[in-house]
Image (tube, grey):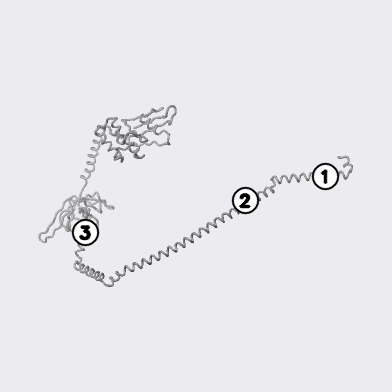
């Protein structure tokens, strides 16, 4: 377990990150995410002791070993790829000299660099240098002598798990109650083996325990006896309780349970027994013996063979012969031969028709292309003229806007022109009043013109 307690990291007097605390459990994958230059690499170097923290501490509980992977290739350019990977082993001496080259080649093959052992880093792609760089720092640590205690503990733990699994699962299988049933097949069971699976619609529910032959010397009739061991725990009945051991198979047979031989594989030819409910099917049953019997139905291939037995082979062959004779008569018909002789001329005429049609289509296509070119030229001309007309119209609109703006400025009561006109009218009114006053005084006293006031 790793404990980071109030850690402050940085360079000199300049902290990069402060008050970092975290708990990392054993086996936990812990990711440090941040922007470039935010201190991720500095934190990792501090955690493994490559740098000292400014404050706080990192505590490891239990044995700790570290592996460092460089962010870049970290390769010696003067060494080959193989020599770069062997360098940690040469420095640590953890691997026998005779085995270092073989082990280094194996490590390079793990990252897909087989065949590049004698190349230099400058000749590798960026991805190849990354993969080789991952081998170099890991080569020394990953190739040191393993801990015998750790390996021994792992082996003992694995052995304990195996024993527990055998006792748990094997004991359960031994304690599990199994039922024995029997089926009798008229067809050959070539390909059937003891231990062959017994399935219910593909689900394993048991296995074949033994095979035998019942022969009637009087009639010469033989039948194959197949003893099966069924696991009732693989089957669950809905809506009712499971029957007891003595009536388990019998109750299922009453519901239409039957057995059929099926091929496990057409390649191996091995057979298995398939159980299924087939109510109303035509079944075969011997009805003897102390074991509960599961009736049988013919297999798919057996049913096909029985159908072929009902086919009149002689009549089929005669019909085939008549068909072949009719085909021969048709092929030797003079009219057909004449038609085949004329076929090259018909094909030649058809080819000429196709060539003529192709030339006409090409001519029509050329005319269409000319029409399209004329249409494009007309559209271009209209577009240019429309652009000129639109520009003139826009100029006229701009002039009208200027005139309206000037008229608006002229008639605006708060505008400069209106204020000047108002002042002029005011001055004219004052002058008119003075002249009227002077006229009145002169009218009363004409001598005012001589005296002045």
* SS at mark 1 in the image: helix
Whether residue 199 is situated above or below residue 171 in the rendered picture: below
Distance from Cα at disc 1 to Cα at disc 3: 141 Å
Question: Left of 396 or right of it: where is 60?
Answer: left
Of 47 and 70, the residue lying toward us: 70
Disc 3 crowd rating (10 Å Cα; few below 14, some 14-19, many 20+) is few
Which label is found at residue 398? 2
Mark 1 crowd level (few <14, some 14–19, many ≥20, 10 Å Cα): few
- Count neighbours of disc 2 (C-alpha within 10 A) and say few if under 14, some if 14 to 19, many if 20 or more: few
Q: Which of marks 1 and 2 is in front?
A: 2
The residue at 55%/55% (across/down) is: 384
User: Disc number at residue 435?
Assistant: 1
User: Quick check: can you spot residue 137?
Assistant: no
Rendered residue at 21%/58% (across/down): 299
**67 and 18: which is toward the camera:** 67
Q: Which of marks 2 and 3 is nearer the N terminus?
A: 3
**Front: mark 2 or 3:** 2
Residue that carries the numbered disc 3 in the rendered image:
301
Q: Does residue 14 appear in the picture of this structure?
A: yes
């Amino acid at each position: 377990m790793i404990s980071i307690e109030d850690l402050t990291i940085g360079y000199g007097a300049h902290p990069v990150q402060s008050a970092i605390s975290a708990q990392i459990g054993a086996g936990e994958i812990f990711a440090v995410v941040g922007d470039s230059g935010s201190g991720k690499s500095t934190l990792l170097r501090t955690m493994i002791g490559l740098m000292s923290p400014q404050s706080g501490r990192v505590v490891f509980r239990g044995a700790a070993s570290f592996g460092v992977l460089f962010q870049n290739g970290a390769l010696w350019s003067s060494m080959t790829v193989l020599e770069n990977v062997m360098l940690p082993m040469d420095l640590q001496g953890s691997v026998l000299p005779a085995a270092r080259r073989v082990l280094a080649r194996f490590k390079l093959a793990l990252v897909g660099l087989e065949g590049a052992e004698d190349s230099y880093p400058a000749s590798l792609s960026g991805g190849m240098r990354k993969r080789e760089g991952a081998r170099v720092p890991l080569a020394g640590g990953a190739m040191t002598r393993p801990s015998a205690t750790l390996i021994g503990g792992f082996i003992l733990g694995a052995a304990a798990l195996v024993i527990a699994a055998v006792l748990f699962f094997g004991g359960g299988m031994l304690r599990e109650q199994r039922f024995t049933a029997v089926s009798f097949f008229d067809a050959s069971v070539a390909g059937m083996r003891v231990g062959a699976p017994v399935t219910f619609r593909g689900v394993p529910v048991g296995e074949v325990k033994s095979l035998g032959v019942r022969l009637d010397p009087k009639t010469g009739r033989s039948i194959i006896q197949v003893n099966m061991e069924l696991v009732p725990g693989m089957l669950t009945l809905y809506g009712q309780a499971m029957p007891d051991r003595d009536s388990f198979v019998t109750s299922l047979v009453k519901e239409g349970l039957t057995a059929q031989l099926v091929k496990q594989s057409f390649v191996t030819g091995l057979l298995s027994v398939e159980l299924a409910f087939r109510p109303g099917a035509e079944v075969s049953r011997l009805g003897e013996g102390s074991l509960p019997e599961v009736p049988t139905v013919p297999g798919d291939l057996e049913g096909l063979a029985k159908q072929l037995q009902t086919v009149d082979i002689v009549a089929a062959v005669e019909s085939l012969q008549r068909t072949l004779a009719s085909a021969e008569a048709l092929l030797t018909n003079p009219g057909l031969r004449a038609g085949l002789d004329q076929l090259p001329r018909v094909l030649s005429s058809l080819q000429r028709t196709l060539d003529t049609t192709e030339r006409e289509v090409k001519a029509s296509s050329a005319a269409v292309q000319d029409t399209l070119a004329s249409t494009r030229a007309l559209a271009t001309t209209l577009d240019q003229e429309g652009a000129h007309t639109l520009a003139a119209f826009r100029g006229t609109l701009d002039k009208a806007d200027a005139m309206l703006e000037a008229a608006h400025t002229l008639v605006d009561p708060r505008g400069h022109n209106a204020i000047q006109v108002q002042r002029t009218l005011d001055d004219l009114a004052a002058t008119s009043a003075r002249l009227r006053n002077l006229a009145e005084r002169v009218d009363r006293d004409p001598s005012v013109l001589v005296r002045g006031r």
